[in-house]
Image (cartoon, rainbow, N blue to C red):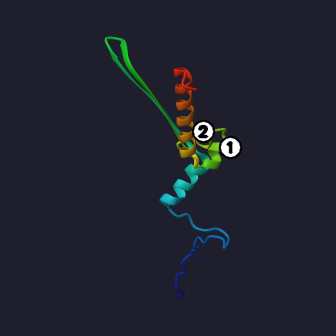
Amino acid sequence: MTEPTLPATTSRQFPSTATPPHPATLADILERVLDKGIVIAGDIRVELLEIELLTIKIRLLIASVDKAAEMGIDWWRNDPMLSSNAQQLTDENRRLKDRIEALESGDE
């Protein structure tokens, strides 16, 4: 009597160049968001008896500096509070205001 044979089983193996899927880490997700960019927009409206009392518009863009510049958003380059010469601009502004005051009062 011959022994019964079991069907051959195949094990699923990944090709040597592919890696098995793994759960995304926070760093992976953050890298994807900064690379692609994400926009969150919303409006909050407060009404009383169909009279609009308050409207707040919220717009939030999360992206890397490179991606934002690629989209044409670069306000931080010219913002005096974010640039390295903010103190220089503040001093120049103060001198100009003093000079205008002196000219208006007739001291100069």
The numbered mark, 1 or 2, whose residue comes first in the sequence reads 1
Q: Position of residue 45 (x, y in %)?
A: 39, 22
Number of residues whose C-alpha sits closer than 10 Å to that of mark 2, classed few (under 14), some (14–19) or many (20 or more): few
Please name the residue that numbered disc 2 is placed on: 75
Foreground residue, 93 or 51? 93
Foreground residue, 55 or 103? 103
Residue type (three-letter) at the residue carrying disc 1: Glu
Residue type (three-letter) at the residue carrying disc 2: Trp
Q: Quadrant of residue 28?
A: bottom right
Q: Position of residue 101 (x, y in %)?
A: 52, 26
Query: Is 25 drawn above or below residue 79 in the view shown?
Result: below
Q: Position of residue 108 (x, y in %)?
A: 58, 26
Q: Position of residue 49 (x, y in %)?
A: 31, 11
Foreground residue, 85 or 66? 85
* Residue farthest to the front, as pictured: 107
Q: Residue at x 57, y 41 (%)?
A: 89
Query: Is 47 drawn above or below residue 91 in the view shown?
Result: above
Number of residues whose C-alpha sits closer than 10 Å to that of mark 1, classed few (under 14), some (14–19) or many (20 or more): few
* Residue farthest to the left, as pictured: 49
Query: Is 49 drawn above or below residue 60 in the view shown?
Result: above
- Mark 1–mark 2 Cα distance, whole angstroms, equals 13 Å
Please name the residue that numbered disc 1 is placed on: 70
Query: Is 50 drawn above or below residue 94 in the view shown?
Result: above
Element type at marker 2? helix
